Amino acid sequence: MKKYTIIILVFGLAALIAGPGCRKLDVPPKSIIQDQDVFGSSQGIVAYMARLYSELPIEDFRYSPQRGLNMFWIISPPPATTGEALSRDQTGSMQENSSTDWNIWSGCYTTIRDCDYFIQTIPTYAANYNADTIKRWIGEAYFVRGMTYFALVKRYGGVPLVNKVLNYKPGSPVDSLQVPRASEKATWDQVDADLTFAINNLPEAWTSDGKNGSRANKYVAAAFESRAMLYAGSTAKYNTTTLFDANHNQVCGMAASEAAGYFQKSLNAAKMLDGHYSLYLSGWSATDKNAQYQNYVNLFFDPASPENVFIREYQYPNSVHGYDAYNVPRQLIGSNGYSSEVNPTLDFVEQFDGLPKNADGTLTTLDAGGHYLLFDNTMDLFANAEPRLRGTVILPGDQFKSQSIDIRRGIYTGAVGGGISPLLPAGSRAQYPTTNLITSSTASQTAYKLPNGNLMNPAGLSGVFTGDQTCAISGFSVRKWLNPNLPTAQVLENNETQTWIEMRYAEVLLNRAEAEAELVSLGQGGADLQTDAMAVINQVRSRAGANPWTDPGTTPIDTIRKERRKELAFENKTYWDLRRWRIFSKEQNGRIYRILMPFFAANAGPNGQYFFDARTDERNDVYTYDPRWYYEQLPGNAISKSPNVIQNPGY
Amino acid sequence: MKHVLYFLILFAFGAVSCSKVDNLAAPSCTITGSTIDEGTGNTLQTEIGGGGTRVKLLETSYDSAPVPLYFQSMQDGTFNNTKVFAATYKVSVEGPFVPLVRTDNSGNTVSDSSQTIQLKNTATLTFKVQPFLRVEWVGDPVVNPDTTVTVKVRITRGTADPAYQQDVTDINLYVSNTKYDGNNNNDPRYSTLTSYSGSTGTALLGQTITITTKGGALAPQDTYLRVGARISAGLNQYNYTTPVSITFQH
């Protein structure tokens, strides 16, 4: 009995202590940051915004279709999926890999939730700030949300629109959380609404950051509105895939009649930047091709460039990338052992002006008699090349980091009398013959003694090696974005910090011209639009040192697209352009891209001469883009979480 | 002794819980059958993998709007899946033919030739479809003196429905050293791929088309040839001839 009494006493005592004690223990844990800590001070808001910007889904130095966003390891680079370039690690067309570390679907919804939470919560703290400041911050959150919906709709078509934070109480039904996909049109309209809200609420410039482009302002939002609405218009016009859900919501595809409205919005938004930004021309000269080339190189590195509309900055060691480590020419390889991941194709190079061309637009490498043209130096073929080409691509023999980039496939030791006939029949996809050719399988080479007594390595210092694809496998190496001042000791993964320019004024001009030409083609605009489109394209061409556009021709849209692909090459834009134009599956239809192989003919001239062989990729990598991929596959977990979310066609 | 009893009671609880283990028997029913060209009565040739015909299952006994299950048809147009749960299914096939389930411009179903089955053991299904294109051999392939091969085919429309009579965009002769020869699996050195714009490809319909392998002499090994053609409809999938094999006497 005594035992029980003690137990009752203990419980009674415990109840007495715990009763009032419980209430006092109900305080926010000190180890978790509370709303008050974040929303109560402008420093807290800056931290919140920094997170939103770092989550912003843009295809920057850390993006590849293979590994998704925010992944440092870029060895399947986006240009190697579009035909801009070949890479040893990318051997064909691909859609985005949906099982990446940073899942694009769920990652985007995390960002959207963060925006919604901010928009809902900040008014509670209105007393802490002046109204104008709050208005700007909300505009910023709308900008990020609009950009995130844009990232989703360009991949998947219509997606669930979640513009309020969803709250789940354990044990309650989940039906209200299973938001179905909105129609594709409603999703594009959501992007339009969010970005328009941002345009109307963001300042022209932030007093703290000025207009350096790292933070969204009114014009940044307008520039992205021009891009998004151009994508929407193209999708309405060119898409042929449709998908309805059980409620007759068209989650893939839109009526073609919507196209003109979107193109008009794109045009209006692009024009808003008039007079506020301009093309980078600081070292440019109308008469000096070398100055034009240097200016084009510098535009990617000058923080004061008036062309930078929206940028993403990096800082060692907090946020870094490895662009140079993956992409320098082989002879400038860093100690991680990577190099030459992006090797521009001949198909890409042939788009530029100033090259000798055949009637069918291909590069001239043979004389009238069908023999190879001979050159003393490899750069002689490119003597009159458009300066922008040299700023985009390292041509064989061009200078980079004070070195001549040495690209050579082999030494031809055969007779040269009467000219050298092609090594292979035209169009052949076979291997090169082994007779009369000295080649090297790796970078450890044995020099060959030329007839004049000099020694020469069979392959160039940057390739091409027959057994090691860490070299210029296409005969070219990429130049755009490569930091010309980075010492080789610093060419390392996760060590580079040059700025990514996500939106530059040149793209705004290209958006404008394309929207105008599309409107004209839809009968929605007259000669004035055509004239304006040509004028803005000529601004871009003149800066590039390309030939001016004088005759609109029968397919002005194609002319504008080609200009866009040249100007924005290697900026991870072409992948999305080929998708929205719905021409990916036409361009990559059993396609093998072409390459340009320089050979040194030992017996030509007194000291030997070069010739070039244009052929298809020696690896015979075939690119075939599946039309299903115009709408990406939704990740399986998005569908298993909600029966209301349906898969795209064909998956 | 008392302690032993406690343990026994614990074990008893354990035994009861064990019998509740969710070990549903593995699926053991079979869905088998074929997709047939209603014009010729032959099974419809397709390619292996995602670009070919697939069978769509909607398990309607579970949910009125279930997440669909798919399995891929074989290249020759037959299909066989021996690991399906017993249930009620609405079954259809998807591929390079006039869809069995058709919707209008606002998402209303206008026709539905799916078949609903109550699967218990084995269900054998036949789907009669109208292929976009019918690709047929004309005679046998001819090995030329230079060891290239020339084939002749005739391509006709498989449907009279104008909604599925878009222009022919591609007519390709595929060369491979396996019979799984097609747009996703062929030897690019020898395959002759031809794209057409406008109505130039369509103008070849009904004619005997002659195509020769490219890239010079074929390698002396087993070689399979197949011709595929497509129009720009649906997911732009190809219709194919049967694969034929050639053995060289070098």
Image: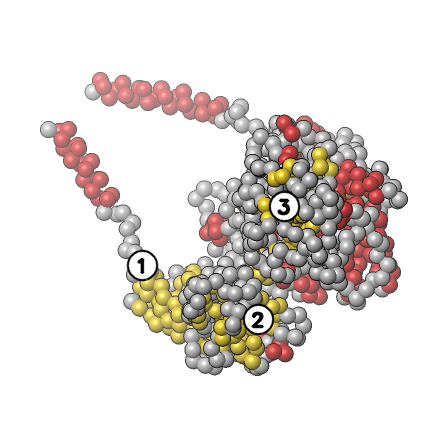
| Colour scheme of the picture | secondary structure
Give the distance between the C-alpha atoms of the residues marked 1 and 3, in whole angstroms.
64 Å
Mark 3 packing: few (<14 Cα in 10 Å), some, or many (20+)? many
- Establish whether labels 3 and 2 are both on one chain: no
Frontmost of labels 1 and 2 is 2
Helix or strand or loop: what does disc 3 sit on? strand
A154 sits to left or right of A176: right
Question: Marks 1 and 2, Cα distance to the nearest angstrom?
Answer: 41 Å
User: What secondary structure is found at the residue carrying circle 1?
Assistant: loop
Residues marked 1 and 2 touching at CB (< 8 Å):
no
| Residue tagged 1 | B27
Mark 3 touching mark 2, by CB under 8 A? no
Single out the mark in the foreground, 3 or 2.
3
Q: Amino acid at mark 1?
A: Pro
Q: Chain of mark 3?
A: A
Task: Kindly identify which chain the residue marked by label 2 belongs to.
Answer: B
Give, as a three-letter code, the residue at label 2: Ile
Q: Farthest left residue?
A: B1
Q: Quadrant of residue A69?
A: top right
- Residue at 63% over, 51% down: A414
The residue that disc 3 covers is A411
Q: Is residue A520 left or right of residue A232?
A: right
Q: Nearer the viewer, residue A131 or A114?
A: A114
Which disc number belongs to residue B171?
2
Which element is circle 2 on?
strand
- Residue type marked 3: Ile
Asked if marks 1 and 3 fall on the same chain, the answer is no
> Which chain does the numbered disc 1 sit on?
B
Dot 1, crowdedness within 10 Å: few (<14), some or many (≥20)?
A: few
